Image: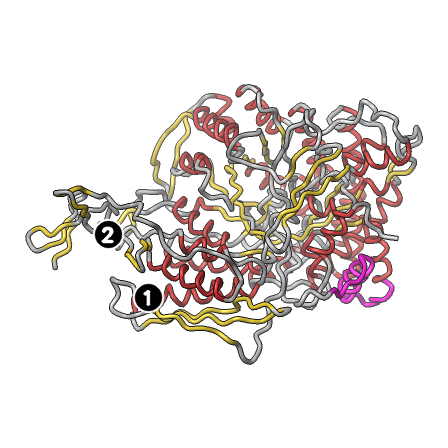
Amino acid sequence: MSRFAAPIAEAIWDMKYRLKEVDGTPIDQTVEDSWRRIARALASVEAEPDAWEDRFYAALEDFKYLPAGRITAGAGSGRNVTLFNCFVMGTIPDSMGGIFEHLREAALTMQQGGGIGYDFSTIRPKGADVLGVAADASGPLSFMDVWDAMCRTIMSAGSRRGAMMATMRCDHPDIEEFISAKSDPARLRMFNMSVLVTDAFMEAVKADGPWELTFGGKVYHTVQARDLWNRIMRSTYDYAEPGVIFIDRINTMNNLGYAETIAATNPCGEQPLPPYGACLLGSVNLARLVADPFEPTARLDADALDDLVAVAVRMMDNVVDASKFPLEAQAREAQAKRRIGLGVTGLADALLMLGLRYGSDAAAAQTERWMKQIAHAAYRASVDLAKARGPFPLFEADAFLASGTMQSMDDALREEIREHGIRNALLTSIAPTGTISLYAGNVSSGIEPVFAYSYTRKVLQRDGSRTEEEVVDYAVQMWRDTKGDAPLPDHFVNAQTLAPEDHVKMQAAAQKWVDSSISKTINCPEDIGFEDFKSVYMQAWDTGCKGCTTYRPNDVTGSVLSVSESDEKPASGQPDPDGDVVYIAEPLDRPGELEGQTYKLKWPDSNHAIYITINDIVIAGHRRPFEIFINSKNMEHFAWTVALTRMISAVFRRGGDVSFVVEELKAVFDPRGGAWMGGKYVPSMLAAIGGVIEKHLISIGFIEGEGLGLKDDPRANVTAIGGATARGPACPACGEYGMRMVEGCMTCPSCGHSKCA
């Protein structure tokens, strides 16, 4: 009998978590094989691996403990992938070379399956002087566009795109541009964005005081704090971003405040991390621990919860030693602090089984009790590990115990930590668990309410197609299985009917016992007034939350979910680490010989031709691109052609639908103007290369297409002269067309730029 509650659960396991050969032949024949693979891999670092393998398997069995997607897919696979879900990258230096070195690090990290976060506050504002080159800085938003383009190129499992978080301090001179960036529906779509809000700023907002925007000790502007706050609120009201991170509160409460400063989070916000910080995630499935559901005697098995948490902490600590890392700096950071993020899923379903309405005072109190129990069980388990294995290397008893989180722990636990240390610097975090929760039978995700009693989910297939599956909530299905056609009780509520303040109440209740943070989306009705909307964020601040993210339906943001019931509206929020960033398949091995084709491309403005070689691999009787080489005698092209060669080849070797490479290249316009080739207008040399790749993919039957080019030049300023059309070339300084020869120099009439012939 299948362990899966619904076909979609089995389909998700098969697509995302089931270990297979490169050609698609399953290695894991059943989900039990997947559990055994994970248990064996994580027990391999134990002194008695066989005994711990069985205990780890028992925790995984029946979806009681759910390691996050990277562990579920990668543990025991023997592949060069990270088991860590998320990373915050190193501090970006304010220099061109340093910026692009960090872009390279980001690409390498995403290539191995990690979501990434970056603080862009360290880049000088737009218009600031760039010493030594007599130029003005383009500002952090321009470099975020570069990151966004990179992320679109790095494909996860050949079908899903990576996810990133961008943060910026509320006192950065470009904060207003950052706030409004996603009002453009085509810009920065690969980023979640959040403003780092300080305590001083919130005090200034409440006092309606002035607020200075500064960089490098220089004050660039002074604004009213409340006006800036209203701009943040208006943007998130209209476009669902940016979110708000209370960064001083995060650093004050951080167990490691004596050893690190945090300025960014992972893509979903549940993991505030220092530079090169990494965290692995896992969730205890509370819905599987409820005895006598829907009965007066319904209860969560407290002993089973303690045991499960202890085993989960040990498994996660082992991951630190079993995992590979994209960068050595990430490995050092993880080993020094051994940070883990144990959370929960199925919380809302468990409350329903106990007869509690999500968002009620009773539900909030019960949530707080469960999270307190989990926190103490996790910390005790980590102390026990420290007794056997030693504390994390940067442990300092007095400083650790002085942190805000440790003040609420009981005295006996604090004394044990003082005497023996603790193995893991931070232990708890609540992540969104959308896909993992579906895989476990559609239990409610993280600490979110039930999304809907049933809904249709769009599932992206490996071939790029989408299917729709109807999914019934775990608790609702259990009610139907045990109560038949009896109507759902009044305490059954979902995300469409809850008031925003109920969401915040639940987040605040859980946050009291979570040492990292919580990823939670507060769903707001479309017709909520702006003042009421702003009050949600103030409630989050006043009740001790570490951040706040809302979703209000609008035309810019979309959802992968649609509700079946006609009277319910779709809701959306942050992407979960098991949805938008997924396990990336092992690159295809290169055979000794490959067949390919070389194409000659002559760009009109270049003295030397470009030669493009594309080699193919045959899989299951079908040809697909495997690698590309771009060469030219023109040394001006050397750096970018090498970069393009490496990037596109890496994408090809990941498999899946890689036709987006053609789309991206063909969309590149050169501000200096394109060229007419074969009767069609090609907007740039990169677009021409994209056309060559497209031609090749069509020729091998990989894609269908119409070929390169546009019917005309969409950027040309065409002037009618005596019935004929004419235009000058584009200005390299301002991009405007109409450059003409004046006194021996090509001169732009728009900006005055000139270049002597």
Using the image as rendered, state which of residue 473 and residue 681 is in the foreground.
Answer: 681
Q: Residue 533 appears in which quarter of the rendering? A: top right
Using the image as rendered, state which of residue 342 and residue 345 is in the foreground.
Answer: 345
Residue 753 sits above or below residue 202 on the image: below
- Taking the view exactly as shown, the residue that stands out farthest to the bottom is 592
Q: Is residue 197 left or right of residue 405?
A: left
- Residue at image x 47%, y 49%? 148
- Residue at image x 74%, y 47%? 8
Q: Secondary structure at mark 2?
A: loop
Residue 755 sits above or below residue 527 on the image: below
Q: Secondary structure at mark 1?
A: helix
How far apart in space, not on screen, are marks 2 and 1 (Cα)? 17 Å
Q: Residue 458 appears in which quarter of the rendering? A: top right
Q: Position of residue 327 (x, y in %)?
A: 56, 62
- Taking the view exactly as shown, the residue that stands out farthest to the left is 743
Count residues near mark 2 (Cα–Cα under 10 Å), then give few for <14, some for 14-19, many for 20+: some
Q: Position of residue 239 (x, y in %)?
A: 51, 32
- Look at mark 2 in the image and give the residue it sits on: 732
Magenta stretch in the rendered image: 26-52
Q: Is residue 43 magenta?
A: yes
